[in-house]
Amino acid sequence: MANRKGRRGFGSVRQRESGRWQARYPGPDGRIHTAPNTFSTKRDAERWLSLIETQISQGDWLNPEQAKVPLGHYADQWITQRPSLRPRTVELYRWLLRKHIAPYLGGVELGKLSTALIREWRAERLEAGVSESVTAKSYRLLRAVLNTAVEEDKILQRNPCRVRGADREEPEERPVLSVAQVFDLAGRMPERFRALVLLAAFGSLRWGEVTALRRCDIAEDASWVRVSRSFVEIPGQGLVAGLPKSRAGVRTVIIPAAVRPDLIKHLETYVGPDQLDLLFTGERSGAALRRPNFNQRSRWTEVVTKMGLKGLHFHDLRHAGNIWASKAGTSTKDLMARMGHDDMRAALIYQRATSDADERIADRLSKLVDEHRKGKTTDDDHPDDDEPGALAPVP
């Protein structure tokens, strides 16, 4: 329908009793929307309408009503609408939201979130004594939630989580066990837990992965184990079997021949004949092994303290296995497969941390310098005279 003479083609403006101008327009959702603020002149109001009209025609329009949704409600729905998340991840996200995000930012409308507000929230969390690790996890969750608000739901034009360095956490250095220490630790465990320690270390398995293994998940000659699930402790539900931590977590791990006899002995002594019988169970109940029961029965804290390894975690066994694998000259791809990671960053960290080859290169270069200073030369420490960038004499 053609507009009457003197009327705008899109939206309308009117002057309020205060003398300021108000702008209104029909949105793609079929509703009439009012500008969030009034304008000092009619021309300013019309310019704003022209901008909105352009956003609608280009598909960049943001629904201002959706921007009024409180962050806490949106984040809660965000977690609920991701059924592919592992139970442990859902538990972590809800705890972070409930404990560190919702009490401080939960009531803020999405459209009113700003980088300055998020920076202030982060600073207050750290000042309150919350660890850098937990604060970083909270920030990354918040950023992921708001990424969806920007990219999928088109509620925000850009993500306000732009605080430099807020997503990084630097966990404390963990001890690196030697092979001898792992066997010593295994020997100090109750006999039914000896194979558990060896398998976690030499198979690079997580606690939830190794305790979820069944007879059908290990070869008869103990040459391999198949990781296809993992136990997770969920409050109110107990142990829940789910998929491993990542997609790459479903894998088959070859077990070193030197420890296979220990695993075979364990199978013969402590594991039932049924293919679904668990490899590791509680001593009395025969049910799945839970970490508190294992710690108590094995006297873990007391044992590692006597070994001079106070504070050692069970996960440090997997850490040791990853270190050994990286020292074996394993490629990044192969190391990722053994570790069960679909992100190469973890594999690269292990490779950088154990770069024996790089140390040998540095030693060789140092030897060349020493020989030069002593007046000795070798065929490989003199670049060709006509080679670009030939080495300058070492003082």
Image: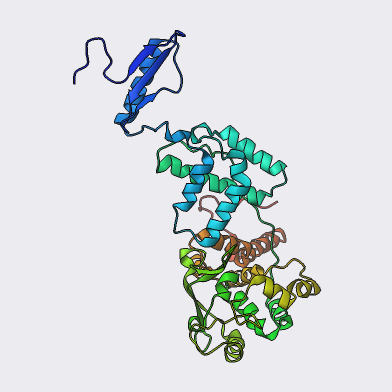
Residue drawn at point x = 77 percent, y = 68 percent: 310
Residue drawn at point x = 72 percent, y = 61 percent: 374
Left or right, 66 with reference to 192: left
Q: Position of residue 316 (x, y in %)?
A: 66, 68
Q: Quadrant of the N terminus?
A: top left
The answer to whether one can see residue 287 in this image is: yes
Count of numbered circles on the image: 0
Q: Is residue 337 above or below residue 373?
A: below
Left or right, 347 with reference to 187: left
Q: Position of residue 143 (x, y in %)?
A: 52, 44
Q: Quadrant of residue 282?
A: bottom right
The answer to whether one can see residue 206 in this image is: no
Q: Quadrant of residue 356?
A: bottom right
Question: Residue placed farthest to the left in the image?
Answer: 1
Give the colour scheme of this rendering. Answer: rainbow
Please name whichever residue, 49 or 219, is drawn nearer the observer in this view of the structure.
Answer: 49
Please name whichever residue, 170 or 102, is drawn nearer the observer in this view of the structure.
Answer: 102
Q: Position of residue 391 (x, y in %)?
A: 59, 52
Please name whichever residue, 50 or 10, is drawn nearer the observer in this view of the structure.
Answer: 10
Left or right, 108 with reference to 316: left
